[in-house]
Image (cartoon, grey):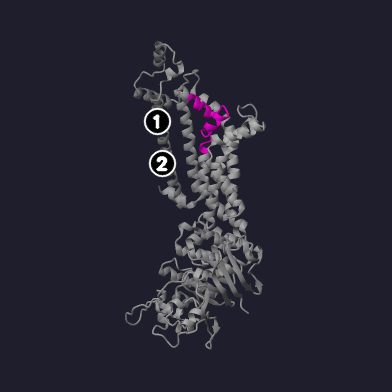
Amino acid sequence: MSYVYRSGHMLSFFLSRMLRAAITILLVMTFAFCVLRLSGDPAQILLGPDAPQDAIEAFRERWGLNDPIVVQYWAYLKSLWSLDFGVSMRDKSPALQLVLERIPTTLQLTIPALILKVGIGIPAGVYAALHRQSIADRGVIMMAVFGFTIPSFVVGLLLVLIFSVTLGWLPSGGQDTWMHGILPTLTMSIGGIGILARFSRSAMIEVLGQPYIRTASAKGMSWRDVVWKHALPNASVPIVTIVGFMIGSLIAGAVVVETIFSWPGVGRLLVVSVSNRDLAVVQCLLLVIAGTMVLANLAVDIMYGWLDPRLRSKSAAH
Amino acid sequence: MPFISIRDLRVAFDGTQVLHGVNLDVAKGEALGLVGESGCGKSVTWLAALGLLPGTARVTGSVTLDGQELCGASRSTLEGVRGGRVAMIFQDPSSSLNPVIRVGRQIAETLRIHRGLMGDAARLEAIRLMDMVGIPDARKRSDTYPHELSGGQCQRIMIAMALAGEPDLLIADEPTTALDATIQAQILDLLSAVRAETGMAMVFISHDLGAVSQVCDRICVMYAGRIVEEGRIDATFGNPRHPYTRGLFDAIPRLEGGRERLVPIHGTVPDPRNLSNGCAFSPRCDRATDFCRSNLPVLKPQPDGRFLSCFHPVTGISKSSCTSGQHESAAA
């Protein structure tokens, strides 16, 4: 009985989240559409500064750029409704196809980076929390601060300087072998490792000070079980938030790193398309990026309820 | 021979001594009340005895359980004692239960650790224990989470969890402080009933004298990390002799008789970082002399069987000496 009651709430929770997600995506789309059109003329940029005026006029006519922006926006929405994401102004290939082609290339960097972040950051943070005030703890805090305060372009350049220029061990750019992926992956993971280590540490310290941890010890449970069965499940809620955000940025999170290491992924496509004012491609990219972010957020919300029954009843009530 | 015997137990946090050599015995089946203001070391004594203080605490002295030394004992020895021979329940039942684990499973964990029960056997026994501590519809409630239960029910779950290990001693650390008055009375009744049924000993830590008088045989009054008076409930309540104990009684409102002004104990609890060389209570004591302020009284046996650490104890029956009416007023 109570379960049915709850699952009914679950459904409305779900629907409201989906609606919110749709609104978010619509806002992102609209914003991108306007800013792109207000910030430069694609005809001028694509055809070059020396292009004759009539060629520019013809280009504008061809892509409908002379219409009022509202008309253009309406046309854009209509084409989206029929799942038509437009074509690239450069080579007329479908924008969606261009974007989808690049995704696996980006994931080749971001998935190993995510594994490194989670696999090193969380255990380091938890270990530091369990050995508070020890040398290991201080070391973890120091490395974590170092990791997330230094911007990735600095880390990337430093790594190139050490491993490519000085030692000559690893290539500094391109995508030919798996060796080419090492430096960009490392560059991307260092900040995330630091962030996760810090968050896991503080989440664990907070939980270890809770009365129920003392209860678990007082009933004769081994410290190992106290940590694994009582502390970690409680500490996982804030950690999952951060990991969810990282999963959400799997596709869009490599813009800077791909640019530094000339990695032909989604991030590079975004940079190139923006500077070319390749409208359809940029719009399609932002749609895909916003979509993955929103999906990851939704997944995190569902995980919350699964991890913490108190949030389950709260979110269902909303 | 006492079941558990504490000798010269001292605890220091970051170099600050908070427990100054406590000696305490609990006999099999006995109920001992431990009272005193917050921070006087009531809880710390027992957390230290079971090795439950954080690593930053320095614990010295001796705690023997049936002759077995616990102070400095191995992890596995302590794990066998905790929850198995000595169980503990705490002040705030709602936060003392793990919020993400179903209550039935939390009880079953103790059953697994100390009685080797697994799966359905553990589940059924957990439900039986919940039933025993008065949780209605225990089968269904065993699948709920702590936040779905009231504070009183959470404390019942804590008691069921404590009973799961079939302990010889239950340390109840202010088990009714966070609960409202009617629930307090129910929990006290439950503790008495459980003790009658199982014959286990109990240490009842509280600052509620009424509650102590209701469930205990003997009382220990602590002040600033030391025991200042110890005796049988009736003797101590009838004639409290340490000025601090007397002060505690005088500060309780009375139901019978006319309205009288309450007599508070003036001053505050001393800071453990700068205690005087003399009696720790002397700055707040009306009877203190210069001798009290420079000499430390020791806990000495008295002719009437109680133990007392005071150079100028109160004599005779006071205006607010305790009768049964006193207990009721305190409990209410």
Residue that appears at 40% across and 81% down: B325
Total numbered labels = 2
Left or right of residue B18, residue B322 in this image: left
Q: Which mark is residue A31?
A: 1
Q: In the rendered view, would you say A317 is above or below A27?
A: below
Residues rendered magenta in the picture: A247-273
Q: Horizontal and vertical percent for residue B200?
A: 57, 74
Q: Please, what is the three-letter code of the amino acid marked with disc 1?
A: Phe
Residue in view at x 56 percent, y 55 percent: A230
Q: Quadrant of the C terminus of chain B?
A: bottom left
Q: Position of residue B62 (x, y in %)?
A: 62, 72
Q: Quadrant of the N terminus of chain B?
A: bottom right
- Residue A5 higher or lower than A67, as above or below: below
Residue type of the residue flagged with mark 2: Ser
Query: For this rendering, which residue is in front, B13 or B317?
Result: B13
Separation of marks 1 and 2 at Cα, in angstroms: 23 Å
Label 2: chain letter:
A
Mark 1 or mark 2: which is in front?
1
Badge 2 density bin: few <14, some 14–19, many ≥20, Cα 10 Å: few
Which residue is at the front of the view, B241 or A103? B241
Q: Which quadrant of the view contains residue A12?
A: top left
Residue A187 sits in which quadrant? Answer: top right
Q: Residue A11 colored magenta?
A: no
Residue named by callout 2: A16
